[in-house]
Image: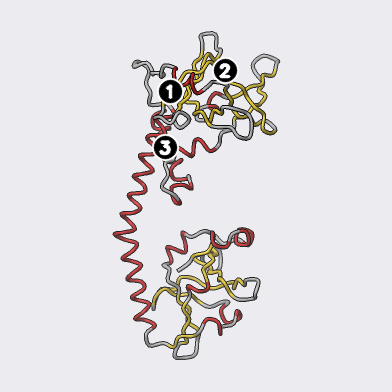
Amino acid sequence: MIRNLLASTAVLAVLTTPALAQDTGTTSNYFQNDRVIYEFDVSTVKPDTATGFLASNMIGKSVLNTSTGEAIEIGTVNDLVLSRDGSIRAAIVGVGGFLGLGEKGVAIDYDRLSFTAKSDGEFDVVSDVTRAELENADGFERPDYIPDWMTVSAVQTEIDKISEGAKQTYETVRTEAIDPAKKRLNETIASWTAEKTRVQSATVSSEALIGSSVHSSADANIGEISQVLLNEDGKAEAVVIDVGGFLGFNEKPVAVSYDSLQMYETENGALLVVAPFTKSELENAKTFGPAAYKKNPDAVTLNG
């Protein structure tokens, strides 16, 4: 059961980590970015209240060499060694970049760690251990009879494998399915609009656009324009297309760049708006929100 839980957690971490969509770095950075640990009060079975840190909160956190603003990361806490009376004897710290070598596990005496307050309840883990001590220390070797599948490094390794597999799967899908479908869509739009009169988008008023249906092909109505978004100069820079829903309910607003639209006049003088997106692309795009758009328009706008 615990193995399955860790595997599910690894998959969830990959799917929810922004780095997977935006860069090719390993997901190990995900564990190291949040370096603070938290102190809190807890009521025990005795009437007293205890104050301390969760061991699980320390695992994966950075150990710094100083509490100043120029702190260097020594490594990350991979495990804790407890004595029979429950006291913590040592922290197993994975040391790598600080030494310029491959990662090496070092057992640092717990009394060599200190905790520097950052804000209410937040602390950095700091150690006065020197570079020479780390270089000369014996590397920690986990006993063979203790399973290592639950360690942070083991979970990170599995997550890295899953991340790379997901990336390769996406590239395969994009190459074999998305790109050809996009090409066919553009060819369909080109043939469909060949005999229609192209309208300069700058000459179309906001009133004429609002309420207009948006098409991706001759028979694919993908939504309806509900808003025209203007820049500081009063020029249209995007439109909001309402996608999906039924009879006006549960529609999803999606911002699409104004330049990506093509506009035509039909035989009866009606306005025809064409967008280079499929309905599926719009349904899976980020939902338009005024606050998010104002903060970063590019992050929530589809561009053709």
Q: Residue 162 occupies which quadrant of the picture?
A: top left
Q: Check disc 3: other Cα within 10 Å, few if <14, some if 14-19, many if 20+.
A: few
| Lower sequence index among marks 2 and 3 | 3
Between tags 2 and 3, which lies in front? 2
Identified at 54% across, 8% down, the residue is 85
Q: Which residue is mark 1?
A: 105
Q: Residue furthest bottom?
A: 268
Q: Could you tell me which secondary element the residue under label 2 belongs to?
A: helix
> In the figure, 17 relative to 277: above or below?
above
Between tags 3 and 1, which lies in front? 1
* Relative depth, front residue between 40 and 295: 295
Instruction: Residue type at mark 1: give it.
Output: Gly
Residue 202 position, x and y percent, is 55, 82
Q: Which mark is residue 8?
A: 3
Q: Could you tell me which secondary element the residue under label 1 belongs to?
A: strand
CA distance separating discs 2 and 3: 35 Å
Q: Residue furthest front?
A: 132
Instruction: Residue type at mark 3: give it.
Output: Ser
| Lower sequence index among marks 1 and 2 | 1
CA distance separating discs 3 and 1: 27 Å
Quarter of the image for the C terminus: give it: bottom left
Q: Are marks 1 and 2 in contact (CB under 8 Å)?
A: no
Q: Check disc 1: other Cα within 10 Å, few if <14, some if 14-19, many if 20+.
A: many
Q: Which mark is residue 78?
A: none
Q: Which residue is mark 2?
A: 112
Identified at 67% across, 24% down, the residue is 41
